[in-house]
Amino acid sequence: MNTVKVLSDISVAVIGLGYVGLPVAVALARKYPTIGFDIDARRVSTLRNGIDWTGAISQEELVASKLEFQSDPTALADSNFFVVAVPTPLTTGNRPDFSMLESTCKLLGAVLKPGATIVFESTVFPGATEEICGPALEKASGLKCGVDFKLAYSPERINPGDKERQLEAIIKIVSAQDEESLELVAGVYGAIIDAGIYRASSIKVAEAAKVLENTQRDINIALMNEMSKICGLIGIRMADVLKAAGTKWNFLQFTPGLVGGHCIGVDPYYLTAKAEQLGYHPEVILAGRRINDSMPAYLASQIVLKLAVQGMPIRDARVGILGITYKEGVPDIRNSKVVDLYEALATYGIKPRVADPRADVEETRHEHGIELEDCADWSGLDVLILAVPHPEYSEAIQDQINRSVRDGGIFVDIKSIVNSNALRSDLIYLSL
């Protein structure tokens, strides 16, 4: 039970009600008067009806929450503690895209009053909160940063789809412009975080910590992906190598795979952009990104090679892909590398069929031109790819294989979750 004293005279507004903002808003609403704001009126409407398409918050919890949902910016006028949790994606050239963050600062500037505190949770490069957000808020509000309003930064650590590591159970890093603001922010978050509060020495330190967390994971996965390629050339399974290496006490448990989503596949580019701005060209970080970004094309080439070796047709090969979201257990298709795999196969004249029980049919069609199907209807496939092991797939994969893959066909198990020894003897097995 969290026994931190709830601060008085705090009126919260959380801007952005996605995977990050909604859980924060719901948690804060248990302790403070809180508005959950999103510019998407349809999102606000569905949340008011107790429906969260991300699956982060249950209908029962939404209905019971005291959180006030708004899409009208004027409703924010009485708030004095703002939490900004809007996306910070990449441009087509893998450069930081601050457009949504800057738009949010303009929106807040119109309602900002002296004495307000603005906490940014969006992932940025070190320095962005004070160098980009602060001036943008000043321009929009006519107020003085550090005097009339205070900046703070508290990096989000929510892991979508993870039911064990909820918001309250993850240590919260906080940082601010000055000691007084730091204690205020620590106090507000301390009322909802059971795991504890870590006060970073500066905003830049907190920003750097966030991008480092995901960059470290990116590089470690890149090592696994490169080793997987080497194992393929040697003729051994990467899964067997990992099992053997994992017997050592200090071996880090990372596995190869497709690295997409809005964190690991994005944050390293924010860090390298700042480094290059300062005249330093990162080598290890960008090398890791190149390896991970290359994996969809590499995997497509391995599938085509298997088809050719087995004398199967390549052009118009019957291929089914299970899963299109960026990871298992979530409906989020942002920056999914399964889309890249789909497109890589298309360059060989293959038009895969795709199924995903969690992805939104309309969004997938609108964003990528891909029509989702019901995999229960698949049969006679030359290749079945388990790209995203949603529980719906992993729990019944043997039946799916037996029902949909033809004799002598290929089964691709990207994350090596299936016991290959238990598969039909006629199948060709491929994994990273």
Image: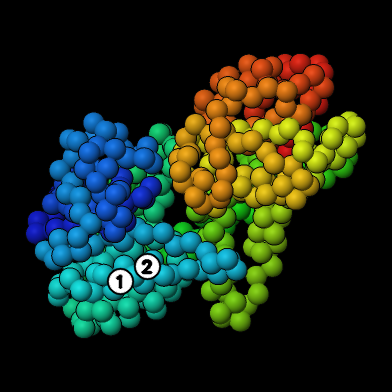
Task: State the residue at coordinates (46%, 46%).
Answer: 363
Task: State the residue at coordinates (61%, 81%).
Answer: 279
In-front residue for pair 266/212 = 266
Vertical position of residue 394 compared to residue 216: above or below: above
Which amino acid, mark 2? Answer: Leu
Which amino acid, mark 1? Answer: Cys
Vertical position of residue 9 compared to residue 361: above or below: below
- Residue 101 is marked as 2
Q: Residues within 10 Å of mark 1 (few under 14, many from 20)?
A: many
Quadrant containing the N terminus in the rendered view: top left
Vertical position of residue 150 compared to residue 253: above or below: below
Q: Position of residue 248 (x, y in %)?
A: 69, 35
Left or right: where 319 falls relative to 308: left
Left or right: where 406 falls relative to 56: right
Pointers 1 and 2 in contact (C-beta within 8 Å): yes
Q: Is residue 209 visible from the viewing direction of this image?
A: no
Where is mark 1, residue-wise? 105
Q: Secondary structure at mark 2?
A: helix
Left or right: where 122 falls relative to 341: left
Calculate the distance from the C-alpha at mark 1 to the C-alpha at mark 2. 6 Å
Quadrant of res 383:
top right
Q: Secondary structure at mark 1?
A: helix
Q: Position of residue 51 (x, y in %)?
A: 29, 38
Q: Residues within 10 Å of mark 2 (few under 14, many from 20)?
A: many
